[in-house]
Image (cartoon, rainbow, N blue to C red):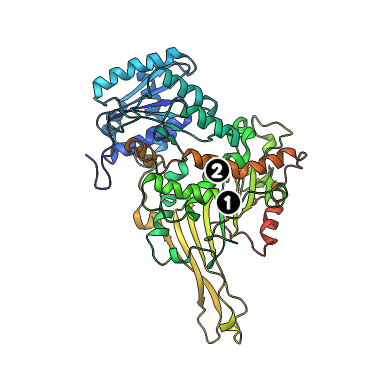
Amino acid sequence: MANSEGRTADPNIMVIFGASGDLTKRKLIPALYNLSRDGLLSGDFAVIGVSRREMTHEEFRGKLGDELGEHLPTDVDPDLWANLRDRLYYSPGDVNDPACYERLRTLMEELDAKYQTKSNYFYYLATAPRFFSPVVEQLGAAGLVEEDEESEKGPWRRVIFEKPFGTDLESAKKLNQDIRHVLLERQIYRIDHYLGKETVQNILVFRFANGIFEPLWNHRYIDHVQITVAESIGVEDRGGYYDRSGALRDMVPNHIFQLISLVTMEPPVSFDADAVRDEQAKALRSVMPLSPEEALRRTVRGQYGEADLKDGRAQSYRDESNVPADSDTETFVAMKLTLDNWRWAGVPIYLRTGKRLPVRATEIVIQFRKAPFTLFRHTDVNRLPPSRLVLRLQPDEGISLSFGAKKPGAVLKLDQVNMDFNYKDYFGAPPSTGYERLLYECMLGDQTLFQRADMTEASWKIVAPVLDVWKALPAREFPNYEAGTWGPKAADELLERDGRKWVRCCI
C-alpha cells in the first residue's frame, strides 16, 4: 500500500540492459529497495537483468545482494531485501543478437503470468550510447514495445535512456529520429539523474510557491547568475570514455542546461509534464547563440595538471589510465551565456564545471543588483554588498540568503549576514540514491522530470558553435591549471572583464 505521499506504482516488469555494470548495483537496485521500503513499489513487480556475461538467476541475485549494503546509507532490512531479491531474474545475451530478445520475451511471459504484471514493461538502457538505437530496433522487431497509438489504456511500454543523448547536434537529431521510428514520444524517457535530486526539484517550488521571490526574478533586480558544478576527483577509471567526451559534452548540454532551464523558465500553466517542459524548452531556445568570435571570447577550457594535495600527489589528466599522453581533451569549461527575452535581458549567466577542483559542490548563485548608494553618501559606509541567494544542490543541500545588516556599535557600518536553511537539518536525510523519484515517475507515466526531444536538440544547438570553434583551433597548451585549484586563470578573467568575480563555493 502506498504511503501518504504517493500511490503505489503500476504492476510492471523492469528490464535493465547492461545489468552487469556499476549503475545497476550502485544506483538502480538500491533505488528499487528504497521504493519498496517506502511502499511505492507494486507487489506485482519483477526485474530482469540483461548483459553478455553468463549468469544464473541466483548468481545475479547474489552479486547484487553482496554489495547492496555498500550503496545504502542505512542497514539492509533482511525481509525487505529477501522480497526484492526473489523478484530479480537474469537473461544473458548480446544486445545485437535477435536470439537475446526471444529469450527475453519467453522469460517476460513467464513472469507476466507469475506476478500478474499486466504486460506493463519498461526498459532501462544502462549501456554505452552506441547501443541505444540497436536495442530499440531489436525491441521493436521482437514486438516488445508495442502500444496502442490511439489510446493510453492497456499495457504500457517505456524506455529510459541514460545520458549522454548524442555527442553533438547532428547525432542527437539522428538518435531522436531512429528511436521515434519505433517508439512514440510518450514512451521515451531521457533521464538526467540531476533531476532526481530533491533540491533541483525544489527550484520550481521555491520560485513559484513563494510570493516574495518570484516578483524579483527578472532583469530589474538580478545582476547575474552563476552555476558551478565542481568535482574534486579526477576521471578515475573513466579515462577511455571521458577522453572522447570532455567536460563540455559530459556536463553542459544535460546537467547544467537543465538547471538553467529551471532557473530561467516562465511559470507553467500547470505542473503537467508538457506544460513544464514547454517552458523549459522556451528558455533553452532563448539562449543567444554564440558567434565564432563570441565562442572564443566567452568560453574557457582547461585541463588539470599534477599537484600535491592533502590526501597525496594528484597526477595530471594525461597520466590517468586510458588517456593519451598528448590528449587535448578539456577537463574544465567556463562559459558566459545570455538569454534573449524580456525577463532576462542583459543578465549574464556564468557557468563552470570541471574535474580536480578544490571541492565537490553544485551551486546556483542568484546575485541581486546593489541598492542605490544615495542614502549612505554622508556616512562611513563605503560599500554596499549585494544580496545573494545561493541554492546548494550537493553535497549539503540547502538554501542561503545573504543581505546587508548594520554591525553593532555607535558608528554606522554594514556587514553581510547569512540566513541558512539546510534540508538535512530541517527534514532529515531520507536514504536516497537520487534515482528513486525518476524510476517511480516512469512507472507512473509522468515525464515531467525527463527531457523531451526538442529540449535535447536545443541544448546541443547552444554548444554546437563552441565545439566547432574548439575543433578548428590548434592544440592547446595543456595542462593549464593545477589539480585542487579553481581552473585556469582565464576563468577568473571571464568575469573580471565584466567587473564581477566567482562566488566561493560552500560559503
Sequence-first tag of 1 and 2: 1
**Could you say whether the residue bearing mark 1 is in a helix, strand or loop?**
loop
Q: Nearer the viewer, residue 356 or 74?
A: 356
Give the residue furthest to the top.
Answer: 99
- Across and down, in percent, residue 249 comes to 60, 39
Q: Nearer the viewer, residue 386 or 135?
A: 135
Inspect this view and state whether residue 309 appears.
Answer: yes
Q: Please give left or right for residue 114 compared with residue 131 in the image.
A: left
- Across and down, in percent, residue 336 comes to 63, 54
- Above or below, 209 against 463 in this view is below
Q: CA distance from mark 1 to mark 2?
A: 9 Å
Which residue in the structure is indicated by mark 1?
287
- Above or below, 212 against 84 in this view is below
* Residue type at tag 1: Val
Q: Residues within 10 Å of mark 2 (few under 14, many from 20)?
A: many
- Above or below, 363 against 166 in this view is below
Quadrant (top left/top right/bottom left/bottom right) for the N terminus:
top left
Give the residue furthest to the front.
Answer: 150
Circles 1 and 2: CB atoms closer than 8 Å? yes
Q: Residues within 10 Å of mark 1 (few under 14, many from 20)?
A: many
Total of numbered circles in the picture?
A: 2
Which residue in the structure is indicated by mark 2?
458
Instruction: Please identify the quarter of the rendering in which residue 212 is found.
Output: bottom left
**Could you say whether the residue bearing mark 2 is in a helix, strand or loop?**
helix
Q: Please give left or right for residue 286 compared with residue 40 in the image.
A: right
Instruction: Please identify the quarter of the rendering in which residue 253 is found.
Output: top right
* Residue type at tag 2: Ala
Which residue lies at the image location 40% right of the left edge and 23% below the top edge?
A: 49
